[in-house]
Amino acid sequence: MSTAGERAFFEPTARTRAKAAIQAVEGQTSAEIVVALRYASGDYRAADWASGALVALASLVALLYLPWTFELHFILVDVVLAFAIGALASATIGPWRRLLTPARVRAANVRAAAREAFVDRGVGGTRGRWGVLVFVGLFERTVEVVGDDAIDPKALAGFDASVAELRAAVQATSLDRFLAALATLGPVLAARFPHGDDDVNELPDEVEEPKSGG
């Protein structure tokens, strides 16, 4: 079940505002910004199975230690039902699913999905190799920024700070804060890649259509 903050990122008005923010950034720099949005970046069913197993185990322990006697068939049905309830709870309650998924797994899924989106969206095909993908993983509560060959964070003053603020905004599921952080990429990129009169828009400005995750 998504939260109000998560749903805000998927509203049509959010897509319109994000497109305007991207265009504002690209009006300052020759670099190209692409935003890709996912609710989840990977398959997290393992967390659901783990949740089901934990709830089933807790149910079994309770039945064994309660001061009453239960029929064997009742115990079997109770444990199976407890597993189903635990798995369903994980699948529908984001915070519980996140708790059961190691941070390294979530981070790895976001990195892999971001690199796939980088290729799928053709971010590496600009003439100056200055494409920048801002990949948002809402379930993972983080952002992965992937730049093409010309984008060297060490040579861009303020780039790391912008990325950190983008991640903080998604961690807080604040659309307004995310768009404000996105806007800070304009002057950061313009310092090294100023907008020229001959610049053309090489990549779509629309936020990529989100896909469902596991």
Image (cartoon, rainbow, N blue to C red):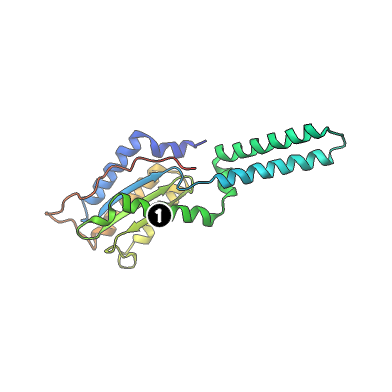
Is 152 rendered above or below residue 125?
below
Location of residue 55 by image quarter: top right
Residue visible at 24% across and 62% down?
A: 191
Q: Position of residue 51 (x, y in %)?
A: 63, 44
Q: Between 200 and 23, which is closer to the camera in this rendering?
A: 200
Left or right side of 68 for 168 = left
Check disc 1: other Cα within 10 Å, few if <14, some if 14-19, many if 20+: many
Q: Position of residue 44 (x, y in %)?
A: 53, 46
Location of residue 83 by image quarter: top right
Residue visible at 30% across and 49% down?
A: 121
Is 176 rendered above or below residue 108?
above
Residue visible at 46% across and 42% down?
A: 213
Residue placed furthest toward the front: 73
Q: Amino acid at mark 1?
A: Glu
Residue visible at 27% across and 57% down?
A: 124
Left or right side of 34 for 40 = right
Q: Between 76 and 133, which is closer to the camera in this rendering?
A: 76
